[in-house]
Image (tube, rainbow, N blue to C red):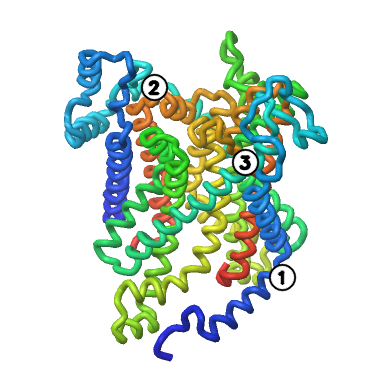
C-alpha cells in the first residue's frame, strides 16, 4: 500500500510539473508573449525598466527555474495589471469560486444520482427516456445562454432574484441575500454538470443490478429497500466518486463562463480578466492552481479507491 | 485467414450495409442527421440568397422586431439578425468541424503511437496526456488564446487541442488492446511495416469508437467556440459567430431580450443534433455499451 501511495504521489508530481512546464512555455514562447507589454508611447528606457522589473530580460529557461522555485515557496509573481502578488489575488478569489462550485456540485450530485437511479430502475420505460432527454439537453444547451435566459426570466421579467454579483452592495453579511444571489448561477452550473453524473450512475446501477451478489441478496429474501441501499447503491456510488477529478475539470471550465455571465468575482472571472488584459503571471497562477486541485483530487480518489478495492494496488 | 478484412473487401461491404440498416432503425439519429445536413446546406449556401448583408449597419433601423423584410428582426446596429445567424453559423460550424479534425488527428496519432509501441514511448506520451487532462480545458484554451491571439485558425487549433487528450486516451487503450492480436502478428510476419500495421489494420478497428467520440466532439467544439466568442476571446467582430452575437445581445437584455434568444437557440439545436447523432452512432457501432 505504501509503495502504491508513493508511486501515485510521484506520478501526481510529474503531471503537475508537466502542467507548469506546458503553461509557462506556451505563454513565454508565443510570438506575442509577455514582451507585448509595449505600446507605441513606450520609450526604450521605459521598456527596459519594465522588462527588468518583470525579469523578462533573462532567457526563458532561467525565468522558468526562478518562477518554479518561487511557486514551490508559494510565490507566484506579481500581477502586471493590478500590481498585487498573484498568490494574494488567488487567495481572494478562490473563496467565491469554492462557494459556487461546491453548491453546484452538491446540487448536481443529488439530482444526478437520483435521476440516474430512476433511469436505471425504469430502464427503457418513459422515465428512463425523460431522464436521458434532460441530460442530453444539459450537455447541449450552452450554459452561458441558459444563464442569460434565466436572468431574463427570473431577474428582468419576474424580478424574483438578483441578476448579478454574489451579494448586494453596501449591506453587511446577510445569509438570505447571499443565498438569493447563489440560486441562479449554481443551478445553471449544476445543470451542465449533471449529465456526466446521471450517465455514470445509471450505468453503474444497471451493472450492479445484474451482478451475482444482488441476485443472491434477493434470493435470500432481503427486503427490496435493503438490496437497493446496502448492496446496489453503495457499490454503484464508487464509480461516481471515481470521476470526481473529471467533474472538477468540468466544474472549473464551467465556472469561467458562469462567473462571467453572473458577475461572480471568483477565479474563473479572474482568469478572463487576466486573459483580456494579457496579465501573464495571473493566467499562469490560475492555471497552475486549477491543475494542482485537479491532480490532488485525482490522487485522493485513487487512494480511496485503493483502500476500497485491493485489486487496484497490485495493478 | 492470413490478413484481416480491410475496407473494400466483400465482407466489409456487407458489414457496412448491415450497419446502414441498423442506423436506419434509429429515428432520433436520422432526424438529427437530416437536421444537420439542412443546417450545413443553409449556412453554406444561404447567405447568397438572403438580400441583407450580415455586416452592414443601418442606424435608422435598429432593434426592429421580426417582420416580412427582416425575418428575425434587426440588432443594435440595424443589421439583419437572420443574415447574421446564417453567417455566424457558417463560422461556428466550420470551427466545430475543423477543430474536431485537429483533435481527432492529434489524439489518434499520439494515443496510437503510445498504445502500439508501449514502454518508454507510452509512459512519456501518456504523462503528457495526463497533464493536458489535468488542466481544465477552458483554462488551457485561455492560456493559448492569450498567448497566440484569436485569429480564426488559432481558435480552430486551440479548440482542437482542448479535445485531443480524450481522443488520445481512447486510441491508446484500443491500440494497446489490438497490438497483440493475431491479425496484427500475421501482418507483421508477412513483412508489414509498423506504419502499415497501424494504419491498415488497427486503425479500422478503432474507427467506430473514434467516429462516435468525434461526432460528440463537434458538438463540444461548437459549444466551446461559442463560449470563447461570448467572452470576447474567440471570433472577433465584425465577423459574426453565434457566440459573439450573444455577447452583443447581453447588452440589450432589458430593451430587446429576444436578440439573446436566436443565437443561443441555434447553438443548442445544433449541438443537440450532434449529441443525438453521436448517441445513435454509439448504439449502432459500439456493441459493448
State whether residue A19 is above or below residue B163: above
State whether residue A40 is above or below residue A197: above
Q: B50 or A212, which lies in front?
A: B50
- Residue A190 is situated, as x and y percent measured from the top left of the image, at 60, 39
Q: B6 or A211, which lies in front?
A: B6
How many numbered badges does the structure rendering display?
3
Alpha-carbon distance for marks 3 and 1? 34 Å
Label 2: which secondary element:
helix
Q: Chain of mark 3?
A: B
Mark 1 — residue?
A: B25
Q: Nearer the viewer, mark 1 or mark 2?
A: 1
Looking at the rendered image, the quarter that the C terminus of chain B falls into is: bottom right
Q: Residue at x 31, y 36 (%)?
A: A30
Looking at the rendered image, the quarter that the N terminus of chain B falls into is: bottom left
- Residue A138 is situated, as x and y percent measured from the top left of the image, at 64, 46
Label 1: which secondary element:
loop
Q: Residue furthest bottom?
A: B1
Do pointers 2 and 3 mark residues of a single chain? Answer: no
Q: Chain of mark 1?
A: B
Q: Nearer the viewer, mark 2 or mark 3?
A: 3
Q: Left or right of B198: which side holds A157? A: right
Q: B30 or A19, which lies in front?
A: B30
Do pointers 3 and 1 mark residues of a single chain? Answer: yes
Mark 3 — residue?
A: B87
Residue B150 placement: quadrant: top left
Do pointers 1 and 2 mark residues of a single chain? Answer: no
Alpha-carbon distance for marks 1 and 2? 55 Å
The answer to which of marks 3 and 1 sits earlier in the sequence is 1
Q: Chain of mark 2?
A: A
- Residue A51 is situated, as x and y percent measured from the top left of the image, at 23, 21
Mark 2 — residue?
A: A89
Q: A237 or A81, which lies in front?
A: A81
Amino acid at each position: 500500500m505504501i509503495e502504491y501511495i508513493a508511486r501515485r504521489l510521484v506520478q501526481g508530481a510529474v503531471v503537475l510539473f508537466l502542467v507548469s512546464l506546458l503553461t509557462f512555455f506556451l505563454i513565454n514562447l508565443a510570438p506575442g508573449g509577455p514582451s507585448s507589454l509595449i505600446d507605441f508611447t513606450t520609450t526604450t528606457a521605459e521598456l527596459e525598466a519594465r522588462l527588468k522589473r518583470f525579469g523578462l530580460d533573462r532567457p526563458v529557461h532561467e525565468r522558468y527555474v526562478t518562477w518554479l522555485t518561487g511557486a514551490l515557496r508559494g510565490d507566484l509573481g506579481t500581477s502586471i495589471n493590478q500590481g498585487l502578488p498573484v498568490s494574494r489575488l488567488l487567495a481572494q478569489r478562490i473563496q467565491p469560486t469554492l462557494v459556487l462550485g461546491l453548491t453546484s456540485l452538491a446540487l448536481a450530485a443529488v439530482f444526478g444520482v437520483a435521476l440516474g437511479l430512476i433511469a436505471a430502475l425504469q430502464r427503457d420505460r418513459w422515465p428512463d427516456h425523460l431522464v436521458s432527454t434532460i441530460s442530453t439537453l444539459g450537455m447541449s444547451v450552452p450554459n452561458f445562454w441558459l444563464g442569460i435566459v434565466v436572468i431574463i426570466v427570473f431577474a428582468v421579467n419576474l424580478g424574483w432574484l438578483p441578476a448579478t454579483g454574489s451579494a448586494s452592495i453596501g449591506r453587511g453579511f446577510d445569509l438570505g441575500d447571499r443565498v438569493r444571489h447563489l440560486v441562479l448561477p449554481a443551478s445553471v452550473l449544476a445543470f451542465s454538470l449533471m449529465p456526466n453524473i446521471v450517465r455514470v450512475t445509471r450505468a453503474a446501477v444497471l451493472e450492479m443490478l445484474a451482478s451475482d451478489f444482488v441476485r443472491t441478496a434477493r434470493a435470500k429474501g432481503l427486503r427490496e429497500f435493503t438490496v437497493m441501499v446496502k448492496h446496489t447503491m453503495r457499490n454503484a456510488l464508487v464509480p461516481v466518486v471515481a470521476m470526481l477529478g473529471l467533474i472538477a475539470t468540468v466544474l472549473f471550465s464551467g465556472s469561467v463562463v458562469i462567473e462571467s455571465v453572473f458577475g461572480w468575482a471568483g477565479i474563473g472571472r479572474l482568469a478572463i480578466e487576466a486573459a483580456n488584459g494579457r496579465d501573464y503571471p495571473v493566467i499562469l497562477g490560475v492555471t497552475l492552481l486549477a491543475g494542482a486541485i485537479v491532480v490532488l483530487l485525482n490522487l485522493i480518489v485513487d487512494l480511496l479507491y485503493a483502500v476500497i478495492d485491493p485489486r487496484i494496488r497490485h495493478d | 485467414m492470413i490478413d484481416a478484412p480491410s475496407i473494400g473487401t466483400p465482407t466489409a461491404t456487407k458489414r457496412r450495409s448491415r450497419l446502414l440498416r441498423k442506423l436506419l432503425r434509429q429515428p432520433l439519429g436520422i432526424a438529427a442527421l437530416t437536421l444537420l445536413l439542412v443546417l450545413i446546406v443553409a449556412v453554406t449556401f444561404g447567405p447568397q440568397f438572403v438580400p441583407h448583408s450580415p455586416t452592414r449597419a443601418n442606424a435608422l433601423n435598429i432593434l426592429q422586431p421580426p417582420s416580412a423584410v427582416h425575418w428575425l428582426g434587426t440588432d443594435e446596429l440595424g443589421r439583419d439578425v437572420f443574415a447574421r445567424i446564417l453567417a455566424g453559423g457558417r463560422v461556428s460550424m466550420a470551427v466545430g468541424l475543423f477543430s474536431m479534425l485537429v483533435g481527432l488527428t492529434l489524439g489518434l496519432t499520439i494515443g496510437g503511437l503510445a498504445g502500439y509501441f508501449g514502454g518508454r514511448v507510452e509512459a512519456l506520451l501518456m504523462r503528457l496526456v495526463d497533464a493536458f487532462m489535468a488542466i481544465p480545458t477552458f483554462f488551457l484554451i485561455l492560456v493559448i488564446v492569450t498567448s497566440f491571439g484569436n485569429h480564426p485558425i488559432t481558435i480552430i487549433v486551440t479548440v482542437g487541442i482542448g479535445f485531443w487528450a480524450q481522443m488520445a486516451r481512447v486510441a491508446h487503450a484500443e491500440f494497446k488492446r489490438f497490438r497483440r492480436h493475431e491479425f496484427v502478428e500475421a501482418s507483421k510476419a508477412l513483412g508489414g511495416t509498423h506504419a502499415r500495421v497501424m494504419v491498415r489494420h488497427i486503425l479500422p478497428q478503432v474507427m467506430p469508437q473514434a467516429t462516435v467520440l468525434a461526432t460528440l466532439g463537434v458538438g463540444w467544439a461548437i459549444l466551446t467556440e461559442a463560449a470563447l466568442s461570448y467572452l470576447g476571446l474567440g471570433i472577433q467582430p465584425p465577423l459574426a459567430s453565434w457566440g459573439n452575437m450573444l455577447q452583443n445581445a447581453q447588452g440589450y437584455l432589458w430593451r430587446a431580450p429576444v436578440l439573446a434568444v436566436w443565437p443561443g437557440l441555434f447553438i443548442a439545436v445544433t449541438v443537440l443534433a450532434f449529441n443525438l447523432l453521436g448517441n445513435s452512432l454509439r448504439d449502432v457501432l459500439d456493441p459493448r455499451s
